[in-house]
Image (spheres, rainbow, N blue to C red):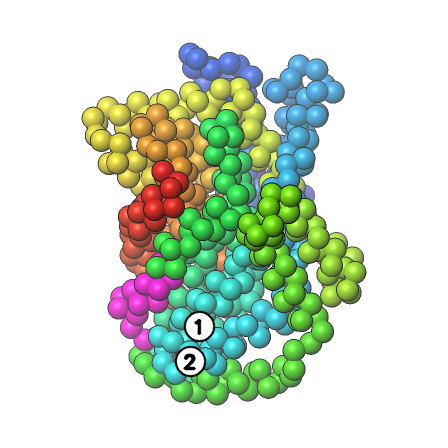
């Protein structure tokens, strides 16, 4: 039921939660009234996002206005509005927004499809090979596609459906188990893994970077290259295991797919030679990866280091100057502008919850409860990460989950004695890997689940199995790898 542009019931629930915390629940000892009132606005915002009371950008806009009007961060109106708008000055927010605009070129030029069909032409003899082709396509696109939904749901999923249809596998005919069921699961489960491998692979990752830096007083500030190197080995192992695990749990009826390669070659022939726009896109992607990875600084010295966000602006500028993207393309990329809006609001609120001491208070509660079991830090961290991870069953937004829980759980883990870098990298990975769990876990999941190839029961079983595999690899292999790199 809607009233104007508002879904009435979710909006009333969010408003009731906000008013309950603000006016009814007493301010706990050790928490200032301003911090508690900001928490009320924050929880109400998260509830509105989860309940989809309004589009997330609209919810963010309302939250920014309420923070400024209520003066919870500062009694002076001029300073309160400056605080409320402070999120827009965060460079990581613009990194993601600009990168989403750049990734629009994948769809416009057709380069994303070409990459996917090339992998299928190379690996498509067997169904398992087609699965790996889809996974590799995800991996290649991930560093420059901050919208995991656009990557997994908008680029890879149509390719997957075309392949399944070419083998007569469709939900409408009741033949989804031929091959489409398996490929759908591989299509989806590639998405959380690749999202965990690069800061620029999904929009909430820079939020994780910001929260880690704030909690540690900037002692840990994950760069693009540090994150990518840390996630390289556990990510590749997860990508190697995932198609095999799903193949074992839900084996497809069709095991051999020689026609898949023929189908991919047909699609590539129909696309014709690589276009001017595709060539420019490849050049821009190569330049972005080169500069984000810090290769010039590594070879030529610190004077050749470039800010990650500035590099993203350079990439977009090249696409505009060469005409691969027009300014209208940039203006029409609603998801980018939407991301900048909601990201700015949530980063602002999370930052001031930390400044006002609320995060430290809540993390103290978490740490006290876990420490009460008297466990060694290794086991305590596993419990902490497990609770954080599987709480995603109750969230329909990765961003909302990270904003609500990450900072407090990270601070609690530090208090329990976990090495800071180990904990930061483990929780950072978990923040994307938790998307594997449900058919509503992130924007990609309803797209792929909605195509009807996989039942809800099969989706949840596969999600739980992959959650155990992914977490085990990230904790054990990742932990050893990070130690070898000297990170902890």
Task: Please identify the quarter of the rendering in which residue 372 is found.
Answer: top left
In the rendered image, the vertical position of residue 479 relative to residue 278, given as above or below: above
- Mark 1: which secondary structure? helix
- Mark 2: which secondary structure? loop
In the rendered image, the vertical position of residue 166 relative to residue 53, given as above or below: below
Q: Which residue is mark 2?
A: 124
Q: Residue furthest top?
A: 29
Position in image of residue 100 (x %, y %): 63, 54
Position in image of residue 239 (x %, y %): 38, 62
Q: Residue at x 53, y 85 (%)?
A: 265
* Depth order, front residue of 421/28: 421
Q: Residue at x 64, y 47 (%)?
A: 304
Magenta span includes 245? yes
Q: Which residue is mark 1?
A: 133
Q: Residue at x 71, y 55 (%)?
A: 316
Q: Are the residues at dot 2 and dot 1 in contact (C-beta closer than 8 Å)?
A: yes
In the rendered image, the vertical position of residue 89 relative to residue 306, given as above or below: above
CA distance for labels 2 and 1: 7 Å
Report whether 477 appears left or right of 322: left
Quarter the C terminus occupies: top left
Q: Which residues are magenta?
A: 238-252
Q: Residue furthest front?
A: 300
Task: Provide the major secondary structure of the magenta segment.
Answer: helix
Report whether 43 appears left or right of 331: left
Magenta span includes 106? no
Is any atom of residue 453 visible in this view?
no
């Amino acid at each position: 039921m809607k009233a104007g542009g508002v879904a009435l019931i979710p909006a009333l629930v969010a408003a009731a939660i906000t008013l309950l915390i603000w006016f009814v629940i007493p301010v706990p000892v050790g928490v200032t009234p301003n911090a508690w009132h900001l928490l009320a606005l924050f929880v109400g915002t998260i509830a509105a996002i989860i309940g989809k009371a309004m589009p997330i950008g609209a919810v963010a806009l309302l939250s920014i206005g309420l923070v400024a009007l209520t003066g919870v961060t500062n009694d002076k109106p001029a300073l309160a509005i400056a605080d409320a708008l402070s999120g827009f000055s965060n460079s990581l927010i613009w990194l993601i927004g600009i990168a989403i605009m750049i990734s629009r070129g994948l769809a416009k030029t057709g380069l994303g499809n070409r990459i996917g069909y090339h992998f299928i032409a190379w690996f498509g003899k067997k169904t398992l090979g087609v699965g790996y082709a889809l996974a590799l396509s995800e991996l290649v696109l991930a560093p420059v596609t901050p919208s995991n939904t656009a990557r997994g749901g908008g680029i890879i999923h149509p390719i997957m459906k075309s392949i399944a249809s070419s083998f007569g596998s469709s939900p409408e005919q009741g033949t989804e188990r031929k091959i489409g069921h398996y490929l759908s699961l591989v299509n989806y489960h590639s998405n959380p893994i690749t999202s965990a491998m690069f800061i620029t692979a999904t929009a909430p990752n820079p939020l994780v970077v910001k929260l880690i830096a704030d909690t540690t007083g900037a002692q840990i500030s994950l760069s693009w290259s540090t994150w990518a190197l840390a996630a390289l080995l556990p990510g590749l192992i997860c990508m190697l295991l995932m198609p095999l695990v799903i193949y074992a749990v839900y084996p497809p009826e069709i095991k051999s797919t020689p026609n898949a390669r023929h189908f991919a070659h047909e699609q590539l022939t129909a696309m014709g030679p690589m276009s001017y726009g595709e060539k420019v896109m490849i050049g821009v992607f190569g330049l972005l990866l080169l500069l984000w990875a810090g290769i010039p600084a590594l070879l030529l010295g610190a004077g050749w280091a470039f800010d990650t966000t500035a590099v993203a602006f350079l990439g977009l500028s090249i696409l505009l100057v060469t005409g691969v993207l027009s300014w209208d393309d940039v203006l029409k990329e609603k998801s980018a502008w939407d991301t900048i809006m909601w990201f700015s609001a949530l980063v602002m609120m999370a930052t001031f919850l930390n400044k006002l001491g609320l995060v430290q208070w809540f993390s103290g509660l978490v740490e006290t409860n876990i420490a009460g079991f008297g466990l060694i830090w290794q086991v305590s961290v596993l419990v902490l990460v497990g609770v954080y991870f599987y709480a995603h069953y109750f969230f329909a937004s990765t961003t909302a989950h990270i904003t609500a829980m990450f900072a407090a759980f990270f601070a609690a883990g530090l208090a329990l004695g976990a090495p800071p870098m180990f904990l930061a990298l483990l929780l950072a990975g978990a923040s994307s890997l938790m998307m594997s769990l449900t058919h509503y876990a992130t924007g990609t999941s309803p797209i792929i689940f909605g195509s009807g190839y996989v039942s809800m029961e099969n989706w949840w079983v596969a999600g739980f199995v992959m959650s155990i595999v992914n977490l085990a690899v990230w904790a054990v292999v990742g932990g050893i790898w990070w130690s070898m790199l000297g990170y902890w």
